[in-house]
Image (cartoon, rainbow, N blue to C red):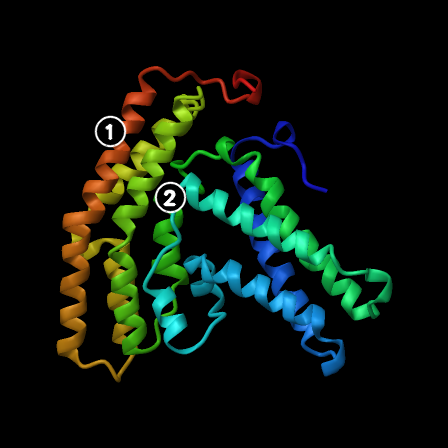
Amino acid sequence: MVRSTSQIKGKAYEEFVMSILTRAVTAIAAALVLMSTLPAQQRIVDDLFREITDDLILHDPTIATMSRYFTGEEQNRLERQITPLTMEWRKGRTERARLGLAELRKFDRTRMTDVQRVSADLMEWGLESFVRRDRYSDYSFPLDQFQGANVTLVSLLAVVHPLSTERDAENYVAALGQVGMRMDEAVGEALRIAKKGIIPPKFILQATIKQMQSFIDQAPAQNPFVSALVQKMAAIKSIPETKQAELRASAEKIITTQVYPAWKKGIELLQFQNAKATEDAGLWRLKG
């Protein structure tokens, strides 16, 4: 059962939302694996599962990167991108989930095998999680010290992004080139929900401002985006030193010209919000 936002506060709510997304994707993928074990004549539902899963992950480069779901050039293309952080993208995912549910519910589960029914239940739960989560998305702060874009974007590349080949390193730098854009989107979302009266309490704003300021106070060469790239490339003997130097220089330039300016915009917004925020963190302070 999905809990209501009135039952979840602060960091716990952010962790809950992220766990829902992870479990939803895991459930969909698990359903697909289960169905792949069926005999050929029983794979009509399997075809639908694959179509739904392919479509969702194809539109979510971050999940595609984390799972390495596809192969070849399709996977490489996705690993050079970062999933948008806009309301429009989120609505698109919700609509795809709704369409998938509608197709899935056309099948008579009483005529399915036990494996098919379990797989269908997993798929349905995963898709419903995307749909239900959308109702509460505006209660997640786009910028905060735990699960805001200022944290997740860094983690995605510096920690999660695969980097074991020269192509991986090139994909990493290409994805880094989208970080500034995604941060701008997060700032835009923060502005949008602020118009609805939803801003973080003062203690979250102050902690996030401090964290983000510390992030941009570092020289580009010492920034986590760059240091992670350099450290991982050093362990890949097949990447020539000249290529490593080229990629490092590109990464540092992106940090200077794109990432730090985007972070500064975020800090400016949070400072503006801090001037009128209160310490009240209860959901009762919000309308609706």
Query: Observer-nearest residue: 257 or 102?
Result: 102
Q: Which residue, as the protein is rendered here, is positioned at the far right? A: 110
- The quarter of the image holding the C terminus is top right
Quick one: label 2 or label 1, which is nearer the N terminus? 2
- Determine whether the residue tagged by mark 2 lies in a helix, strand or loop: helix
Q: Where residue 209 appears, x then y in whole percent? A: 31, 32
Query: Observer-nearest residue: 58 or 156?
Result: 58
Query: Observer-nearest residue: 286 or 103?
Result: 103
Disc 2 target residue: 149
Label 2: few (<14), some or many (≥20) within 10 Å?
Answer: many
Q: Residue 268 got which mark?
A: 1
Give the alpha-carbon distance from disc 2 to disc 1, as whole Å: 15 Å
Label 2 is placed on what type of residue? Answer: Ala
- Relative to 49, does residue 37 appear above or below in the rendering? below
- Determine whether the residue tagged by mark 1 lies in a helix, strand or loop: helix
Write the residue at 25% across / 40% down. 263
- Relative to 32, does residue 273 appear above or below in the rendering? above
Write the residue at 39% across / 44% down. 85
Write the residue at 32% across / 38% down. 211
Label 1 is placed on what type of residue? Answer: Glu
- The quarter of the image holding the N terminus is top right
Quarter of the rendering containing residue 134: top right
Q: Where residue 193 appears, x then y in whole percent? A: 42, 27
- Relative to 261, does residue 205 appear above or below in the rendering? above
